[in-house]
Amino acid sequence: MTSTIFTAAHGGTAVISTRRPQPQVHRLITTHCRARRPFSVKVQRYRDRKVRSSPACAASSVEGTGKDTSTCVKLLQQAAATRSVAPKEVFSAIRKLEKEKLSADGWAEKLGGESSPGRRWQLVFTTGTKQVQDALKGGKGGGSYFPLIAAQRWDAPKQEIENGVYLGHIASISFLGPWALHSRKMTFDFKRINIKLGPWKFGFDLKAGQFGTKKAPEEGEKQKDGPFFLFIYVDDKICVARGRGGGLAMW
């Protein structure tokens, strides 16, 4: 969650009438990408399910063991697949994984694949900076499942990032640029914007400072940090990161 919406680029960031309602069918972008074939967005369906609390990786569970890591990962994978896990439990699981400072070995290939055009990840869950700050002060934190189809595409061979929001086949807007991963920190910048409106497609290059891109330093000033993600966990099913603004995101 996988949204114009930026995925934790420089702001906060980085799963009903008297009759019983019928479950609604939504469309999701999958993260699967086959090598040696033109890149395409595949679609899968899921049905809304009632958000429920899960005892796994609850706020009172013991931290710091491999078993707890596995429990938290399974909870997050369930949240990404079904969006049925309570947001506070998702937040708690992410925070527990963040405290463990897991090894980032192999994360670049898992994020961006071994061949172009890489892998596409849909944004599923986000938290705002204030929610994280509240948790640090003793609050319960929280977040929400992202309601639109927003996705990141990372291409490891080309070191290219694409951040886009998609409205079916009607319209889309995406930003492209380079990225680099140093341990758990991914720095990136956007150089181009592409827009699709029905049958029309067009785009243009971005100038420094436009749409959240890195600004050129003034004379005598040091170059300020551009947008970045601090990755917390990555596997073949989910990835979790903290954005520059402090918010959390899960794809």
Image (spheres, rainbow, N blue to C red):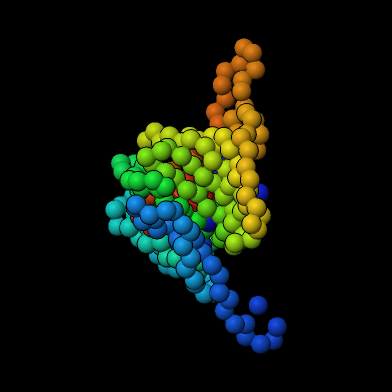
At 41% from the left edge and 38% from the top edge, which residue is drawn? 158
At 62% from the left edge and 50% from the top edge, which residue is drawn? 201
Taking depth in this image into account, of 13 and 91 the one nearest to the observer is 13
- Relative side of 191 to 81, left or right: right
At 55% from the left edge and 74% from the top edge, which residue is drawn? 25
Total numbered labels: 0
- Relative side of 72 to 122, left or right: left
Q: Please, which residue is most extreme toward the bottom here?
A: 19
Q: Please, which residue is most extreme toward the right here?
A: 17
Q: Please, which residue is most extreme toward the top here?
A: 220
Q: Tell me where residue 124 appears, x and y as whole percent.
A: 52, 58
Taking depth in this image into account, of 234 and 39 the one nearest to the observer is 39
| Residue 13 visible in the snapshot | no
Q: Tell me where residue 237 appears, x and y as whole percent.
A: 38, 57
Taking depth in this image into account, of 88 and 189 the one nearest to the observer is 189
The quadrant in which residue 60 appears is bottom left
Identify whether 66 is placed above or below 246: below
At 43% from the left edge and 57% from the top edge, which residue is drawn? 31
Q: Please, which residue is most extreme toward the front here?
A: 199
- Relative side of 4 to 42, left or right: right
Identify whether 163 is placed above or below 198: above
Q: Tell me where residue 156 appears, x and y as whole percent.
A: 38, 41
The quadrant in which residue 238 appears is bottom left
Identify whether 82 is placed above or below 114: below
| Residue 51 visible in the snapshot | yes
Q: Tell me where residue 41 appears, x and y as whole percent.
A: 48, 59
